[in-house]
Image: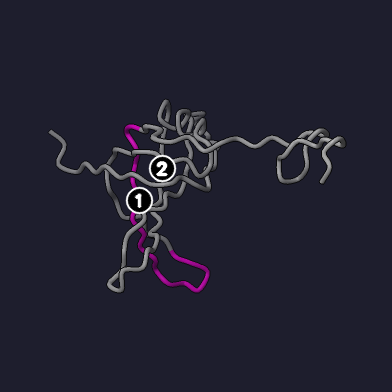
Amino acid sequence: MTTNEIKLSGKISLIKKIDTKSGIPMCKASMGINKKNQDGVWESDYINIVAFQDVATQLLNVTDKSTILVTGRLGINKYVNKDNAVVKAPQITASKIEAVEQAPIISVSPETTQQGFPVDDAMPF
């Protein structure tokens, strides 16, 4: 029985592959979790996610801004910032990733505009 297990759902962003000396697949990402503040206004908290091996490969296949469900262990990442202050940030070491809603992939080709819409010279507008 695991005493430190957490499940969170949110929108994934900033997925970054990390090259390790051992060759073990690793990636880091950030997940935005929405909540209402005391005034009833929606805000987002961002939680760091780290994944290894198969879970890292799975996370790298998720499209930025997709909604995922992460299961893992909660930890506190401590580091010293550029101002020499100690910073503590929550971090989940993922043991399972599930895509809840995949964000669309927009590809741009010579036939599309910067907004991703088809170019049709026959259109009257």
The circle on residue 91 is: 1
User: What residue is disc 2 on?
Assistant: 50
Q: Position of residue 2 (x, y in %)?
A: 16, 36
Q: Amino acid at mark 1?
A: Gln
In the image, the segment drawn in magenta is 80-96
Label 2 element class: strand
Q: Residue at x 65, y 37 (%)?
A: 106
Q: Is residue 70 above or below residue 32?
A: above
Q: Nearer the viewer, residue 21 or 91?
A: 91
As for residue 84 lying within the magenta part, the answer is yes
CB of mark 2 within 8 Å of CB of mark 1? yes
In front of the other: 53 or 13: 13
Q: Secondary structure at mark 1?
A: strand
**Residue at 72% over, 39% down:** 117
Which comes before the other along the chain, label 2 or label 1? 2
Marks 2/1: CA distance?
Answer: 7 Å
- Residue at 43% x, 36% y: name it: 101
Q: Looking at the image, which is closer to me, 110 or 9?
A: 110
Which residue lies most toward the left here?
Answer: 1
Q: Residue at x 53, y 37 (%)?
A: 63
Q: Residues within 10 Å of mark 1 (few under 14, many from 20)?
A: many
Along the line of sight, which residue is nearer the eye, 13 or 22? 13
The answer to whether 55 appears left or right of 22 in the picture is left
Q: Position of residue 62 (x, y in %)?
A: 49, 34
Q: Position of residue 94 (x, y in %)?
A: 34, 38
Q: Which amino acid type is shown beneath numbered disc 2?
A: Val
